[in-house]
Amino acid sequence: MRRAASLLFLLGLALLLAAIYRHLGPNAANVGQLIDARAPTEVGAANIVTSVVLAYRGLDTLVELSILFTAATAVGLVLGREPAATSDRDAGFILRAGADLFFPLLLVVGIYIVLHGHLTPGGGFQGGVILACAFFVPLLARPGRRLDQRWASLIEGLAGASFIVIGLLALVGGEAFLTPLLGKGGMGSLFSAGSLPLLYTAVGLKVGAELAGVLARLAAQQPVA
Amino acid sequence: MSWVASIIVIVMLAAAVAVLLLKDFLSALAALAVVSLALSVLFVILRAPDVAMTEAAVGAGLGSLLFALAIRRMGLARGHKPEDRP
């Protein structure tokens, strides 16, 4: 039975690879130059990488988000509920003062990188990680504090849902899923590239809330004796 | 510009060997973060600032943090040895 199953799996894998090979064809190497030439007028994002990540390959980004979600859910499942109280004392003066100093700084940098993802290098994933670290630094200094997991999962769910809703809104206009909406605007200005900044904001909030939750869960674990 | 790249590559290789040789887990983790950080500088030189940012934030920052928390959880960090605990 198991041998038949693995044979079936191999057959499916071979079919998939054959389909990918047929679909790629000989022109796959030219895709980069084509996108370089067409992206500025088609999408209107000053950062071409963002126009690939969110416009041409938006579906891949959605799958990437779902992979991250699955991983975070698995971490939550394995680590279970947080213990009610921790035996860790507060950190020393330098770490506490540094945490107070760094929290607003990291917050501003994270928000900046998320909001300017379509203009300068960076974007939702990078900014989201910085936001998660910003919310983790105070926990490092004062282990007694708790990150409110309900808020984190609420933000995460709303952000993920809004990413999909923005993608579905394109279907209403008869376009393909996740086609950039709204006007392109002036290239290089903050309100440009249509719905890409909104999508990156959703990605940043989702990644940030998710990773902050994972870090808080891991930090609450006590060392094994 | 190429001599900067070669210095970075040498630093990366030295840090990677240090990860293998260091006995203390936290020191090895610090060396691992050096590898990621040097790699992100290399990405900047190669004109891939997006990838450099991801490498610095995820590879050097978040990855090291996750490793550090896992080392603490396993009780492998210095000062967290089982015989030291009350």
Image (tube, coloured by chain):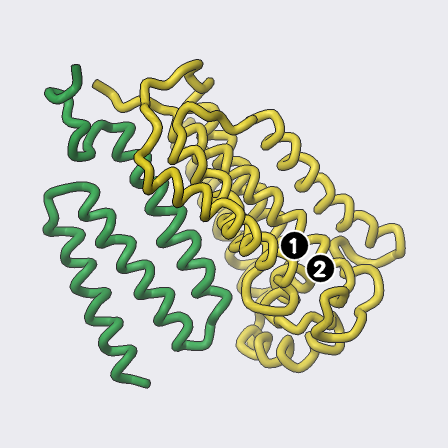
Chain colours: A yellow, B green
Q: Position of residue A159 (x, y in %)?
A: 68, 41
**Residue A191 or residue A134, whichever sits in front:** A134
The one of B26 and A136 positioned closer to us in this rendering: A136
Q: Secondary structure at mark 1?
A: helix
Chain under numbered label 1 = A
A77 sits to left or right of A180: left
Instruction: Please provide percent x and percent y for residue A186.
Output: 78, 74
Q: Amino acid at mark 2?
A: Leu
Q: Are marks 1 and 2 in contact (CB under 8 Å)?
A: yes
The residue that disc 2 covers is A196
What is the quadrant of the C terminus of chain B in the image?
top left
On the image, the x and y values in percent for residue A216 come to 45, 31
Residue drawn 53% across the image and 42% down it? A67
Residue at (78, 63) in percent of width and height: A194
Q: Residue at x 65, y 31 (%)?
A: A154
Characterize the local packing of mark 2: few (<14), some (14-19) or many (20 or more) Cα atoms within 10 angstroms: many
Q: Quadrant of residue B68?
A: top left
Q: Is residue B52 above or below residue B82?
A: below
For mark 2, name the chain: A
Q: Which quarter of the figure has residue A55?
A: bottom right
Residue A68 position, x and y percent, is 52, 42
- Relative to B77, is A101 on the left or the right? right
SS for dot 2:
helix
**Residue at x 25% of width, y 83% of height:** B3
Residue B22, label in figure? none
Name the disc covering residue A200, or none.
Answer: 1
Amino acid type, residue under disc 1 in the picture: Tyr
Q: Is residue B47 shown above or below A179?
A: below
Q: Residues within 10 Å of mark 1 (few under 14, many from 20)?
A: many
